[in-house]
Image (cartoon, helix red, strand yellow):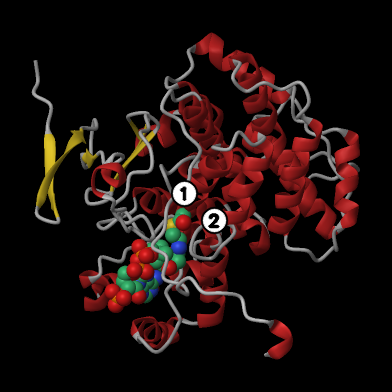
């Protein structure tokens, strides 16, 4: 029998033992849940630099090796051998589907792409120039109004339906946001197309002529979805878990995840990266911008560089660089100005001592903006594509949490540094 490991902390001269929990891979953790009761202290870890917020079976990242596993499978193999729906199924169920399960799941998703017609009227409440992320936060949240009564998420059948509905409808919601901003008519899904191809059709098709899907481009989009599907306890996933920990409606939790993802330090980075490349404009100005990013007195950062966990390389960025080259070759854009600029920027930054010392490497967002631009997706929609894909991970993580027997509402504590206790003065005399 293996001996239970313990970590001993000395607090105010007294030794206190805590169990050590071992994972499959990665850092072991010290279980400090009893720390407050045993010592009267809390831990302080703003930004969660050393805190495991949950136990999870879903995704593992080795930041030093540059490795990303979904349910144990390397991202490189999944991107080569699977489609996005296989990966969504895997994230939620723990195993890849067999042939019959795959056919059944794909058919179910195809059959759930329509949204309640009433939901399409929500778009009219938005300004035409509203940012599409603002629109999809609202519309995804509004889905909770359509699927709330009668749902009991302690039942697996209800969780099945919830997963199917949102995976099927999120491309529809996002494409409608795009159609609304451009004034194009809303397109209904085509059941003969696969998930990524259908999304392209709903985005770019028109009712008056046939839309021909380019398989190289739709496969590229499918790989983009796979690369963004989950990333363990990142900010938006933790947001979904925290929102869901109160028992909130899962559609509303996804809306919370979308809100968090929008920020430029997270999913908004691909949009910010492309805007940065446009601003740099020419290879001759790369040095100037690299110097700015190193200047402590300048808030400018190289967008698409750096990651909290990856300190060697981001494996998704490598795959994205390859997808980018394939798409540009298919479209005859190999000499695309921004692609050339991005390659030059990457090369110079990777040879620069500042970036080497701080272990700053291109992240997934560095090339994803260029690929999406080449696919015809407008810059303001980039983060919506990320949200579409990450919805699979959010829902898998949400379900893992609410079915965990140890699950509790998320409730961090704090170090209070505000005013000491005092009496309220008589305001009329102030
Ligand atoms: N350009 C220049 N310097 C940088 C960059 C960058 N992109 N990223 C980090 N640094 C510097 C920081 O200034 C800091 O320097 P210091 O040690 O002198 O203070 C050091 O590197 C460590 O960076 P932190 O910001 O402390 O690292 P953290 O883990 O908190 O942040 C983050 C990671 C948010 C991704 C950061 O690297 C960043 O803002 N990058 C640009 C935005 C981006 O690409 N985000 C996408 C992330 S991937 C994703 O969400 C899919």
The quadrant in which residue 304 appears is bottom left
Which of the four quarters of the rendered structure image does ligand 1 lie in?
A: bottom left
**Residue 409, position as x, y percentages in the image:** 51, 38
Rendered residue at 51%/12% (across/down): 99
In the figure, 275 relative to 413: above or below? below
Residue at screen point 58% across, 48% down = 257
Residue for badge 2: 371
The structure residue drawn at horizontal position 66% and vertical position 26%, both measured from the top left corner, is: 162
Question: In this image, 237 relative to 120: left or right?
Answer: left
- Compared with 176, 168 (above or below) is above
Residue 390: horizontal and vertical position, in percent?
54, 43
The answer to whether mark 2 is within 8 Å of ligand 1 is no
Label 1 vs 2, first from the N-terminus? 1
Q: Is residue 95 left or right of residue 377?
A: left
Q: Are marks 1 and 2 in contact (CB under 8 Å)?
A: yes
In this view, the residue in front, 218 or 41, is: 41
Quadrant for the N terminus, please: top left
Check the image and report above or below for 292 versus 229.
below
**Res. 74 visible in picture:** yes
Q: Horizontally, is 50 left or right of 419 in the view?
A: left
**Circle 2 residues within 10 Å: few <14, some 14–19, many ≥20:** many
Where does label 1 land, which residue?
A: 323
């Amino acid at each position: 029998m293996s001996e239970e490991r313990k970590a001993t902390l000395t607090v105010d001269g007294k030794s206190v033992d805590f169990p050590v929990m071992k994972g499959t891979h990665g850092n072991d953790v010290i279980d400090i849940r009893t720390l407050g009761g045993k010592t009267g202290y809390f831990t302080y870890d703003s930004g969660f630099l050393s805190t495991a917020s949950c136990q999870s079976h879903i995704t593992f990242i080795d930041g030093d090796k540059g490795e990303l596993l979904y349910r144990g499978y390397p991202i490189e193999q999944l991107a080569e051998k699977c489609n996005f729906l296989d990966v969504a199924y895997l994230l939620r169920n723990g195993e890849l589907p067999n042939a019959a399960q795959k056919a059944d799941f794909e058919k179910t998703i195809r059959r759930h792409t329509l949204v309640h017609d009433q939901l399409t009227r929500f778009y009219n409440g938005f300004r035409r120039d509203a940012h599409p992320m603002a629109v999809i936060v609202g519309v995804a949240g509004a889905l909770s109004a359509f699927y709330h009564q009668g749902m009991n998420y302690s039942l697996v059948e209800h969780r099945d339906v919830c997963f199917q509905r949102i995976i099927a409808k999120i491309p529809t919601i996002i494409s409608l946001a795009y159609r609304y901003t451009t004034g194009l008519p809303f397109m209904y899904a085509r059941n003969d197309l696969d998930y990524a191809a259908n999304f392209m059709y709903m985005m770019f098709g028109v009712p008056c002529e046939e839309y021909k899907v380019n398989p190289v481009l739709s496969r590229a989009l499918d790989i983009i979805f796979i690369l963004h599907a989950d990333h363990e306890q990142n900010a938006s996933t933790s947001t979904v878990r925290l929102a869901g920990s109160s028992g909130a409606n899962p559609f509303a939790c996804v809306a919370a995840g979308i809100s968090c993802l929008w920020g430029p330090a997270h999913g908004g980075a691909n949009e910010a990266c492309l805007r940065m490349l446009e601003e740099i404009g020419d290879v001759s100005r790369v040095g100037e911008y690299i110097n700015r990013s190193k200047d402590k007195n300048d808030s400018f950062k190289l967008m698409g560089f750096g990651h909290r966990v990856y300190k060697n390389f981001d494996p998704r960025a490598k795959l994205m660089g390859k997808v980018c080259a394939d798409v540009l070759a298919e479209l005859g854009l190999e000499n695309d100005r921004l692609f050339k600029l991005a390659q030059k920027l990457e090369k110079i930054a990777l040879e620069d001592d500042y970036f080497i010392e701080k272990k700053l490497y291109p992240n997934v967002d560095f090339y994803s903006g260029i690929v999406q631009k080449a696919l015809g997706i407008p810059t303001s929609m980039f983060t919506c594509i990320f949200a579409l894909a990450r919805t699979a991970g959010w829902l898998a993580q949400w379900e893992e949490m609410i079915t965990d027997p140890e699950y509790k509402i998320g409730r961090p504590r704090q170090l209070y540094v505000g005013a000491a206790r005092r009496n309220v003065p008589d305001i009329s005399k102030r």
